[in-house]
Image (tube, rainbow, N blue to C red):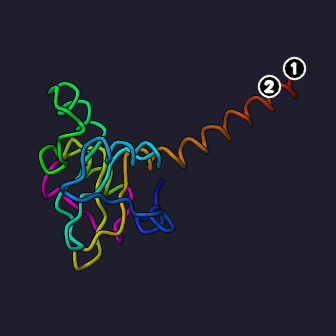
Amino acid sequence: MQGRMISDIIAGRPLFTASKDMTVRAASCLMAENRIGALLVVDKDRIVGIFTERDVLNKIVAGRLDPDKTALSEVMVGNPQTIRADKPLGYALQFMFDGGFRHVPVVDEKGAPLGMVSARDALGQDMVQLERDLQFREHLEENIA
């Protein structure tokens, strides 16, 4: 993970956004179709909020709100903290830990949205390495026996 930059992580990824008036159901379907855990809520090329799977669970389901009638503006986290793409992933992870959230919007120097990093991004490379290590260990054990 050391040396991995946010710009490298978001490179080539599509940016999924929603409008403030999109319904929770429509946003949830968009998230499910694209296998993402959060959407940036954007108005005039500016991030005005973030809507996450936690919001669905804690605000919609637990709050017994109708997902077909509830707009994102009613349940999103407004004005989320953001991070610039020129920072290392470790910085973003500390930022998430300190703030108690799992997703951080990435913006350019003018504040325009570029993408999103999540806690899962940190695990990606580590999980690949763990799998390699386990395969290597199995290979060694087979050759020793």
Q: Give how far across and how far down residue 131 sits, in percent.
A: 64, 37
Q: Amino acid at mark 2?
A: Glu
Which of the 4 image quarters holds residue 83? bottom left
- Tell me the SS state at disc 1: loop
Task: Give yes or no for residue 127 being in the magenta stretch.
Answer: no
Q: How many marks?
A: 2
What residue appears at the point 16 percent right and 31 percent down from the top-left corner? 65
> Callout 2: helix, strand or loop?
helix
**Residue 86 part of the magenta segment:** yes
Q: Amino acid at mark 1?
A: Ala
Quadrant where the C terminus sits is top right
Asked if the residues shown at circle 2 and circle 1 are in contact, with their CB atoms under 8 angstroms apart, the answer is yes
Up-down: is 141 above or below 11? above
- The percent coordinates of residue 98 (x first, y second) are 20, 46
Q: Which SS does the magenta portion mostly show?
A: loop
Mark 2–mark 1 Cα distance, whole angstroms, equals: 6 Å
User: In the current view of this chain or complex, which residue is farthest to the bottom?
Assistant: 110
* Classed neighbour count for the residue bearing mark 1: other residues with Cα under 10 Å, few (<14), some (14–19), many (≥20): few
Q: Quadrant of residue 119?
A: top left
Q: Which residues are magenta?
A: 76-89
Q: Is residue 52 above or below residue 10?
A: above
Image side of residue 139 versus residue 119, left or right = right
Q: Nearer the viewer, residue 109 or 93?
A: 109
Q: Which mark is residue 141?
A: 2
User: Residue 43 placed where, x, y %?
Assistant: 19, 67
Where does label 1 land, which residue? Answer: 145
Above or below residue 114? Residue 52 is above
Q: Residues within 10 Å of mark 2 (few under 14, many from 20)?
A: few
Write the residue at 51% across / 67% down. Answer: 12
